[in-house]
Amino acid sequence: MKTDIHPDYRPVVFQDVTSDFSFLTRSTLASKETIKWEDGQDYPLIKIEISSHSHPFYTGKQKMLDTSGRVDRFRKRYQK
């Protein structure tokens, strides 16, 4: 295997900014921001918009969209 061609695989904290949920995992992503984790060490911080803690599928709080107009247009277009 060639040396110095792979990115660093290290512990990183991902923080869901919508629900203030954080988890520590390993990743190759880099960040200039750091955060002090529960074990007292500093880790790079990656901010994300959606995680399993805030995604509607996992939380059971799905939003209903009004798609009746779309469905009617689809049926009308492909009624043949």
Image (cartoon, rainbow, N blue to C red):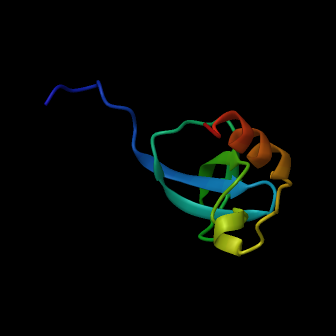
The residue under the point 60% across, 36% down is 80
In the displayed structure, does residue 66 sit left or right of residue 49?
right
Q: Residue at x 71, y 75 (%)?
A: 60
Q: Across the whole image, how many numbered discs are drawn on residues?
A: 0
Quick one: 73 or 29, which is closer to the camera? Answer: 73
- Give x and y (percent) for residue 63: 81, 63
Q: Which is nearer the eye, 67 or 45?
A: 67
- Which of the 4 image quarters holds residue 40? bottom right
Q: Is residue 27 left or right of residue 53?
A: left
Tell me the quarter of the image containing the N terminus.
top left
Give the percent coordinates (x, y) of residue 71. 75, 48
Residue that lies at the very extreme toward the bottom in this rendered image: 60
Q: Nearer the viewer, residue 63 or 24?
A: 63
Asked where in the image residue 24 lies, by quadrant, the reply is bottom right
Residue 70, by quadrant, is top right
Q: Residue 57, position in %: x, y? A: 65, 67
- Of 49 and 75, the residue lying toward us: 75
Query: Image height check: is 52 above or below 45?
Result: below
> Residue 10, how many percent across, how many down?
44, 48
